[in-house]
Amino acid sequence: MLQRPAAALPSTPEQLGRRARRAWLLFAAIALATATAALYGAGLYGRTTELRGLAAQGRTDANLKVALLRAVLESPRALPLLLSEDQQVRDALAQKSAAAIDVLSRKLEGLVSGTKASVLYVIGTDGLAIASSNWRDPISFVGNDYRFRDYFSAAMQSGTAEYFALGNVSKRPGLYISRR
């Protein structure tokens, strides 16, 4: 049997107490380091998980907003096509009578309230607006010359045009969609 030499054994209760305190301090330091590492790891995991969730939610929100914007932009695109085939528009352009223009302006006024378009107006081949949904307003488009506008000249050449610009009369930015 092996025996430890007497010098290696603690000889006094004070030495035993110091040794026990060192063991407890070492245990406490290891436990504190382990708890700190666990809390840091949990925080890092939680932060990473939340950031991934927020990124996914952001992508979903962005895709929904893009779809909504496309829907908003697509809805007024049908109006110029429909109006270019409308008999009241053709009559007003051909006759240029006050009665035909009045009927058309009232029709455009009704379409604006139903479609949420800002303003609808009809321009003759000479570039003059003959009817407009804002015909009752002090700043009506009726009678204004739009020959200089790119959306007018492009539509006269190719049949259709879209142009984003600052309004000459309204002074508001907008998407101008035209059709011959």
Image (cartoon, rainbow, N blue to C red):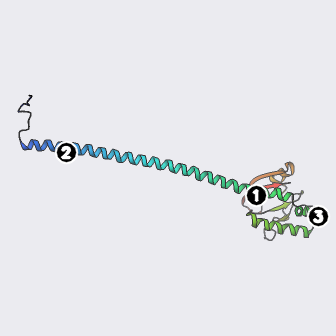
Percent position of residue 111, x then y: 79, 65
Quarter-of-image position of residue 9: top left
For marks 3 and 1 on the same chain, the one whose residue lies earlier in the sequence: 1
Quarter-of-image position of residue 100: bottom right
Give the residue pinned by disc 3. 95
| Mark pair 3, 1: CA separation | 27 Å
Give the residue pinned by disc 2. 24
For label 3, the crowd category at 10 Å Cα-Cα, with few meaning under 14, some 14 to 19 and many 20 or more, is: few
Residue name at image x 63 percent, y 54 percent: 65
Q: Amino acid at mark 1?
A: Pro
| Mark pair 2, 1: CA separation | 78 Å
Residue 161, numbered label = none
Q: Amino acid at mark 2?
A: Trp
Query: In this rendering, does residue 49 appear at all?
Result: yes
Percent position of residue 144, x then y: 84, 62
Residue name at image x 20 percent, y 44 percent: 25
The kind of secondary structure element at disc 3 is: helix
